[in-house]
Image (cartoon, grey):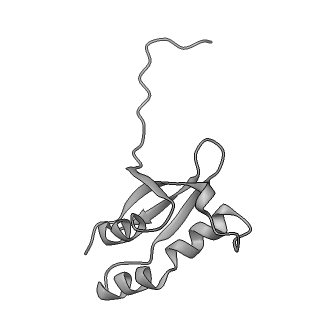
Amino acid sequence: MKRKELIIVHMDASVMPRAFNGHQNWYDAILSLEAFVSATNEDASASAPKLVYAYDIVISGFNAVLTQDHLELVTNVPGFVAAYLDVAAVIDTTYTYT
């Protein structure tokens, strides 16, 4: 079984084709490309990439559950900027306001 991880994918919004009426539609289309379907079908234990969240305020991009194969496909999509592993932040504090 290929390991699936939560990945933040940073995209260049200026590259979004005009055919899409919003970023989320573009990201959904990227994750449903034939190459992603083929990569999923090659490994019976893998599941299709799943869009979790679309970012459009601070950065343009999305958060998705991806295998390494899916991530490699995303890096070849026009508009790809970077990908980051999404990790839970641990808040360390010794002082809080009451």
Looking at the picture, does residue 75 appear above or below residue 94? below
Left or right, 41 with respect to 79, comes to left
Indicate the quadrant where residue 87 lies.
Answer: top left
Q: Residue 98 at what x, y percent from top left?
A: 62, 12
User: Which residue occupies 74% across, 68% down?
Assistant: 21
Direction right: furthest residue: 21
Q: Residue visible at 58% across and 75% down?
A: 29
Spot occupied by residue 22 in the image (x, y as percentages of width and height): 71, 64
- Name the spot of residue 35 as percent of width and height, x first: 41, 82
Q: Residue at x 37, y 82 (%)?
A: 40
Say which of 87 and 95 sits in front.
Answer: 87
As drawn, is 66 to the left or to the right of 26? left
Q: Could you tell me which residue is drawn at 49 percent across and 66 percent down?
A: 78
| Quadrant of residue 44 within the rendered picture | bottom left
Relative placement, left or right, of 3 versus 55 is left
The answer to whether 80 is drawn above or below residue 85 in the figure is: below
